Image (spheres, helix red, strand yellow):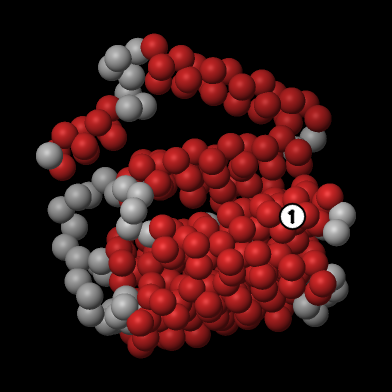
Amino acid sequence: MSVVLLATVLLSVVIGLSLGLLGGGGSILTVPILTYVAGLDAKQAIAASLFVVGVTSAVSVIDHARKGRVKWRTGLIFGAAGMAGAFGGGLLGGHIPGTILMIAFALMMVATSIAMIRGRKNKTITTHDGELPIVKVIVEGLVVGLVTGLVGAGGGFLVVPALALLGGLSMPIAVGTSLVVIAMKSFAGLAGYLTTVTLDWGLVGAVTAAAVLGSLIGSRLAGRIPEAALRKGFGIFVLVMGVFVLIQELPAPWGTALAVTAGVLAVAAAACWFFLPRCPLRTPLNRRTAEAH
């Protein structure tokens, strides 16, 4: 096994950990790993990520279903609508330049990371564990599916907010149901990409096996780590990766300027966190902790 393949497989375990712990984030990690570590071009990486995440989600949903955390009617209808959108997005993505897809993907990562770091602002939202209205599910499924198929991202971290924040499902139910949707949309998006992209199935199989292993580990760790701390830490990680992808893909002057800006902001954030007692970066987390007690 080459060093590149070994590094790719080991990093792929993190893909499964993300899905097992958070119910999403697989493609956000898979695409950069396959692009910058395994050396695939953007379209191959996006197509491969859809297979990896689809299989991993299908395996992960089994445990959630056993624990009653899956709303099958909502999940299947959302997934069916998402499949239609994802297939169209996959067809469209196959004809868009790889650089544009990667920039769109990076912007998706940045937007996702900011939402994760900020967390839910409306703490008084009423949640339930029932099925959602069919029309709302279909509309949301089409929109989320189109984004997923187009850039290979936005599975769990668009589905979970759609089910939890817009639909009102409790977080455990939203996460479990999202895995059904992610699996269905991923395979539909893959079908669209396979009309124009050829994959190395040996590599894809190895990455998938590692991701499935990570998902099993993640499902065992779920509940042992505070959700707010986990999401904030993972959000920062995704933000760093998104900025890295933008630096790699943007033309020289813009990429260099972004790198310098990101470096300055990172140093400023670190100085605020470690040296200022009333740093605003820590205030929300501290306030939530105090409220919890």
Residue 123, how many percent across, how many down?
19, 50
Picture layout, residue 74 above or below residue 199:
below
Q: Is residue 220 left or right of residue 192?
A: left
Could you tell me if residue 275 is visible in this image?
A: yes
Residue 227, how many percent across, how many down?
33, 50
Q: Quadrant of the N terminus?
A: bottom right
Choose top left, top right, bottom left or bottom right for residue 145: bottom right
Choose top left, top right, bottom left or bottom right for residue 52: bottom right
Q: Is residue 133 left or right of residue 181?
A: left
Residue 267, how many percent across, how many down?
54, 18
Q: Element type at marker 1?
A: helix
- The single residue placed furthest to the top in the displayed view is 275
Choose top left, top right, bottom left or bottom right for residue 292: top left
Q: Residue at horizontal 58%, vertical 66%? A: 213
Picture layout, residue 203 above or below residue 292:
below
Question: Which residue was labeled with disc 1?
Answer: 8
- Residues packed near mark 1 inside 10 Å, few (<14), some (14 to 19) or many (20 plus): many
Could you tell me if residue 101 is visible in this image?
A: no
Q: Residue at horizontal 38%, vertical 67%? A: 175
Amino acid marked by disc 1: Thr
Q: How many marks?
A: 1
Q: Residue at horizontal 30%, vertical 80%? A: 68
